[in-house]
Amino acid sequence: MQHRREIAEAQALEEQQLREEKQTQHQKARALTDLTNFLTFLLNCHTLSLAINVVTDPTLTTQEGTLDYIRKTVNLITAEMDLHYYECDSVENQVQMIVDSIYAKDILRQEFRLSGSVTFDSSFELESYQAVPTSGGNAEGIHRGKRRF
């Protein structure tokens, strides 16, 4: 009887230690994410992108089979609408989400000097597009309200 109680106490103690350890790990992970602000995130992304090294030596690269997966999962661009869909999905939607997220937070809106959000016009024609310079020079500006590209 005494032995069973000691075993039960030992198991309870071990479970308590595991819970405390898990809680400590959770708090450490939370502290890491709490300390990361948007500008730190951007700087870290930039630092990581600088570390990318493109390997051009064919003896150091995969020789076969790398495109099989892509051929199976990526639709070919066979028409202008396919290209438009790809552009919207891979560029416009991502830019829209990022700018909207920045614009939704006052501190980020001030930091990036945004005075409006961005929207993309699906009937975009290059000939009719006229860049509107900002007061700083030739750069493209994001203006008050929704800007149509």
Image (cartoon, grey):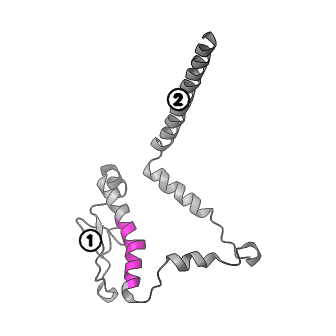
- In the image, farthest residue toward the left: 145
Q: As drawn, is 35 to the left or to the right of 48? A: left
Residue 79 image point, x, y percent = 40, 89
Give the position of the N terminus as an image quadrant.
Answer: top right
Kind of element beneath mark 2: helix
* Mark 2 vs mark 1, CA separation in Å: 52 Å
Give the position of the C terminus as an image quadrant.
Answer: bottom left
CB within 8 Å, label 2 to label 1 = no
Kind of element beneath mark 1: strand
Residue 94 image point, x, y percent = 39, 67
Specify whether residue 87 is in view: yes
Q: Main secondary structure of the magenta part?
A: helix
Q: Which residue is mark 2?
A: 19
Q: Is residue 58 above or below residue 33?
A: below
- In the image, farthest residue toward the front: 1
- Residue type of the residue flagged with mark 2: Arg
On residue 147, the disc is 1
Q: Is residue 30 above or below residue 81?
A: above
Q: Is residue 91 above or below residue 27?
A: below
Q: Is residue 58 above or below residue 104?
A: below
Residue 61 image point, x, y percent = 71, 73
Instruction: Give the residues in magenta.
Output: 82-96
Specify whether residue 139 is in view: no
Q: As drawn, is 120 to the left or to the right of 55? A: left
- Classify mark 1: residues with Cα within 10 Å, few (<14), some (14-19) or many (20+): some
